[in-house]
Amino acid sequence: MSPPPATLTAPLMAARLVITRDLMLAFRRPEQLLQPLAFFVLVTMLFPLSVSPERTTLRVIAPGVLWVAALLAALLALDFLFRDDAQDGTLEQYALSGQSLTWLLLGKTAAHWVLTGVPLSVMAPLMGYTLGVPASASVGIMLTVALGSLALSFIGSIGAALTLGARRGGVLLAILILPLAAPILIFGSRATELAIRGEAYLAPMELLGAIVVLSFTLAPLAAAAAVRISLE
Amino acid sequence: MTWTWFHRLGSPPYVYRLAGRLTPWFGWSAGVLILAGLVGGLVLAPPDYQQGDGFRIIYVHAPTAWLSLMIYTWMGVAAAVGLIWRIKVSHAVAAACAPVGASFTAVALATGSLFGKPMWGTWWVWTPRLTSELLLLFLYMGYMGLRASFDDTQRADRASAVLAVVGIVNVPIVHYSVVWWNDLHQASSLSLAGKDTIATSMLVPLLVSLLGFTLYFGAIVLVRLRGEILRRERATDWIREALA
């Protein structure tokens, strides 16, 4: 491998290159993009089918339904985060590249959020609308799901990295991540509920933002440590 | 000042023998204190003016709930020490802690719901405190599940150590959930600063019981630690000599 040009050695540049690469790969294989979205719609659909098709009932449970469905879809999508790159050896090359693995994983996770979190947050108000949520809440729902899925991508990256070398990764990943994701769910669904009721939802959004900052700064470090362990 | 005492703690043979010597001390003092705490709490302390005799479950519930949190912290610190300085004994301590902590968490949940039935009229309410305790149980389960999914002990050690350190973030959330959300759960009876909201005749047995259960945890972990060390060092000569 030829050494990277000197101008690209800055960690931010490396992270940007990883983001570009991951986005390009994902747009060439759109099933990674579409499957979590389809899963999100399907899970949301289970509630009218199982609880009641009444709009008044659905409107009450809408914040919880949206968040549980988004959380499960994001959890499912975490499987895409490292799996392919671990199998074809890309992760190993990242670890050996001399670049900071933390920054590279930060880029990978950010790209993952663009590919799963952003589409989910665009889809969430639409699904909310089918549950009887007024269209005026769309922006609020979009913002909360976007912020929450960002935090979840980062926290989830730790779990995805830890289960790389493990047997039976799938269920284990859920058990590892869901307890840690509980605060995101609490504040996220609270913010969504307030947005639906047309009230100020800034307070839970700020707590959600605090979780994002915490996970954004710390999770890539833990994920990098976990990736190194899985490569041993 | 010499640090040899500290460095020796990284040596499996030394810790194996030390744990063996310390276990009876922890075990017997735990037995005496738990017995004293239970007699004080179940017999000597007066019934609560509101809750009657029902409150007496606190003498088991509070120590186990306290330990469920303390053991997780302890486990996280041991795991971090093992991860940073690559001390095998530290990883063994963390591994020995997890099942004990999970059991205490389960006991805290069970006694909590036993208390809830007469006091709140239901076995389970989704209060943040109970929910957090349940989440703690799942954190322990995740830790043990991750550990079990690796065949190689060293990889299991290091991967689960990362998880334990990450999980530590959850411990303050559990603790402050009482402050953050107003709910059915009683506010804490104990506080280091300020006036305690519990009579001395009830408090003393509680503290005795707390200390007793903590020492009991120490004894159990020492026994389990010896087991862990035996398993990890089974190929070495000193084990054969120690068991001969």
Image (tube, helix red, strand yellow):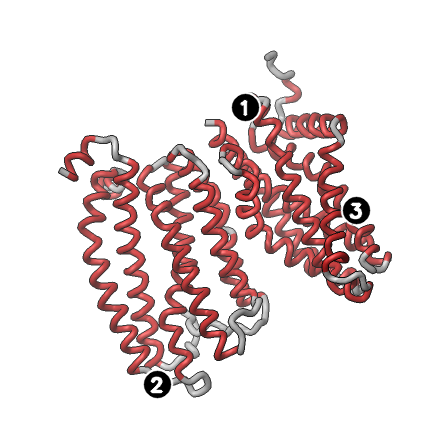
Q: Are marks 1 and 2 on the same chain?
A: no
Residue at 83% of width from left, 55% of height from top?
Answer: A130
Is B138 or B178 nearer to us in this picture?
A: B138
Q: CA distance from mark 2 to mark 3?
A: 60 Å
The percent coordinates of residue A50 (x first, y second) are 72, 58
Q: Which mark is in front, 2 or 3?
A: 3
Q: Amino acid at mark 2?
A: Pro
Which disc is residue A92 wearing? 1
Query: Is the C-beta separation of discs 1 and 2 under 8 Å?
Result: no
Residue at 37% of width from left, 36% of height from top?
Answer: B85
Q: Amino acid at mark 3?
A: Met
Q: Amino acid at mark 1?
A: Glu
The answer to which image quadrant residue B1 occupies is top left
Residue B56's place in the image compared with B138, above or below, is below
In the displayed structure image, the side of residue B64 where residue B170 appears, left or right = right
Q: Residue furthest right?
A: A135
Task: Count residues near mark 3 (Cα–Cα under 10 Å), then give few for <14, some for 14-19, many for 20+.
Answer: many
Q: Chain of mark 3?
A: A
Q: Please, what secondary structure does the residue beneath circle 2 have?
A: loop
Q: Which mark is in front, 3 or 1?
A: 3
The percent coordinates of residue A183 (x first, y second) are 60, 55
Q: Chain of mark 2?
A: B
Which disc is residue B56 wearing? none
Q: Please, what secondary structure does the residue beneath circle 3 have?
A: helix
Q: Which residue is mark 2?
A: B46
Q: Residue furthest bottom?
A: B49
Query: Is the C-beta separation of discs 2 and 3 under 8 Å?
Result: no
Res A202 seen here: no
Which disc is residue A123 wearing? 3
Task: Count residues near mark 2 (Cα–Cα under 10 Å), then give few for <14, some for 14-19, many for 20+.
Answer: some
